[in-house]
Amino acid sequence: MSEVVAIVPGTFDPITNGHIDIIKRAKNIFDKIIIAVAINAGKIPLFSFEERVELTKRVVESDSELHGIEVKGVKGLLVDFARQEKAKVIVRGLRAVGDFEYELQMAFMNRRLNSEVEMIYMMPYIKYSFVSSSIVKDVFFNGGDISKFVPEVVIEAMSKKLSERSGKI
């Protein structure tokens, strides 16, 4: 029996504890996990593509429960990346009804593009059900404490971004 490879995709701008929760739980189910840091044309990211890949790698390296997980950047279609990596599963988190509507559309499109890949959805633990990268950035840049929502390496990277922004004002 061959190993089951699963991809956990996202823009990860930045990666949050909610993302990490889904990744850790997926790791308990599948043989191999690849975190796919993607470009989303509909979003204007705080961190560049390269910075998001690097920051996600640093988070994986800093958490012993994530060791063995690969982090790769994806610039094309996720289903093409899945085919290239021989992944049979794409794992996504669903927080609310709004997520479901978007994910349903994406699942239908992905199925049309590559019927060999299954979409698996996981609900976050309740403490992460409201956490999103957008909310984390908003709280942080307005002086709030985000330590319960992201790993320390993310706070450090965001603090650096804040100081870079302050220097440009």
Image (cartoon, helix red, strand yellow):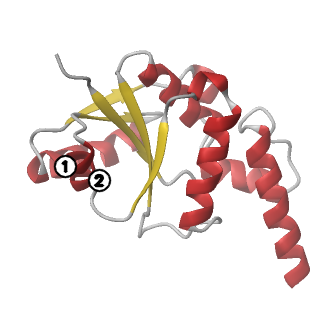
Labelled pair 2, 1 in contact (Cβ < 8 Å): yes
Disc 1, SS: helix
At label 1, the amino acid type is Asn
Q: Is residue 149 left or right of residue 23?
A: right
Q: Which image quadrant is residue 159 in? A: bottom right
Q: Taking 5 as reference, is 169 above or below it?
A: below
> Quarter of the image containing the N terminus?
top left
Q: Which mark is residue 110?
A: 1
Q: Taking 109 as reference, is 51 above or below it?
A: below
- From the image, tell me which residue sits under label 2: 78
The numbered mark, 2 or 1, whose residue comes first in the sequence reads: 2
Query: Where in the figure is residue 157, as x and y percent of width and height?
Result: 77, 55
Q: Is residue 89 left or right of residue 30?
A: left
Q: Nearer the viewer, mark 2 or mark 1?
A: 2
Query: Where in the figure is residue 54, as x and y percent of width and height?
Result: 61, 55
At label 2, the amino acid type is Leu
Q: Which image quadrant is residue 123 in? A: top left
